[in-house]
Image (cartoon, rainbow, N blue to C red):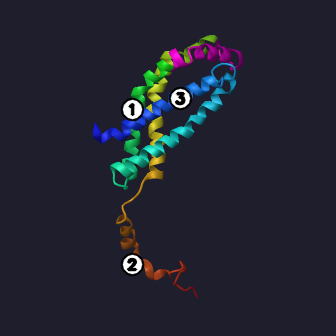
């Protein structure tokens, strides 16, 4: 378990961020009086999500991998964070539904029927605890993998000696260019 301590830690931090985000949505009225703005504003959760993944992968690189991490190592670490979030998702959704915003589904159904062009049955089939439990559990590893793939590109760092390989392969061609990047091959 110590090998995965960083992923577990940041997965739990991510879960706490999700709960905090839901509290902020509730307090700002996005679950009732401003529910019309909810579909747009809720997508801003991507900003703290990317920040958390960046911080998590940077910590993994610097503390667990000694400052060097490949894209693959970062991606795997990020996927593991997503799996931790997946395990937490049902608990998070139950807390949101039962403690933070128990009236959200009723409000979302009413808004979708009145303004969203859905029938009562369509809205009820989408806005319910069972559906949100399934969506949250399935989306956590998928979105985690997408975020991990992007952030692993940002955070990866090669060992200093690996750049030498590039020069060993392409250095024999150095005679074609001068040191200012201009071609030494003269066209007549």
Disc 2 residue crowd, few under 14, some 14–19, many 20+, Cα 10 Å = few
181 in relation to 142, above or below: below
> Quarter holding the N terminus?
top left
Residue 180 in the image: state x and y as whole percent.
54, 80
21 in relation to 119, above or below: below
Q: Is residue 88 magenta?
A: no
57 in relation to 12, above or below: below
**Helix, strand or loop for disc 3:** helix
Instruction: Compare marks 3 and 1 and give the one earlier in the sequence.
Output: 3
Q: Is residue 72 visible?
A: no
Say which of 32 and 125 sits in front: 32
Q: Is residue 136 visible?
A: yes
The disc placed on residue 172 is 2
Q: Write down the region rendered in magenta.
A: 96-119
Main secondary structure of the magenta stretch:
helix
- Point out the residue furthest to the right here: 115
**Helix, strand or loop for disc 1:** helix
The disc placed on residue 84 is 1
Cα distance between the residues tagged 2 and 3: 57 Å
Instruction: Compare marks 2 and 1 and give the one earlier in the sequence.
Output: 1
């Amino acid at each position: 378990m110590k090998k995965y301590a960083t992923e577990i830690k940041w997965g739990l931090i991510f879960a706490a961020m999700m709960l905090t985000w839901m509290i902020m949505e509730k307090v700002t009225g996005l679950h009732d009086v401003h529910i019309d703005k909810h579909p747009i504003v809720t997508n801003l959760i991507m900003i703290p999500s990317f920040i958390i993944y960046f911080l998590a992968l940077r910590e993994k690189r610097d503390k667990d991998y000694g400052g060097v991490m490949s894209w693959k190592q970062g991606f795997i670490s990020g996927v593991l964070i997503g799996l931790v979030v997946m395990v937490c998702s049902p608990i998070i959704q139950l807390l949101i539904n039962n403690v933070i915003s128990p009236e959200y589904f009723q409000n979302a159904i009413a808004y979708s029927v009145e303004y969203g062009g859905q029938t009562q049955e369509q809205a009820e089939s989408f806005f319910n605890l069972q559906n949100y439990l399934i969506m949250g559990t399935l989306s956590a590893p998928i979105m985690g993998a997408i975020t991990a793939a992007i952030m692993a590109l940002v955070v990866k760092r090669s060992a200093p000696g690996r750049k030498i390989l590039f020069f060993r392969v392409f250095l024999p061609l150095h005679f074609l260019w001068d040191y200012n990047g201009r071609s030494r091959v003269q066209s007549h």
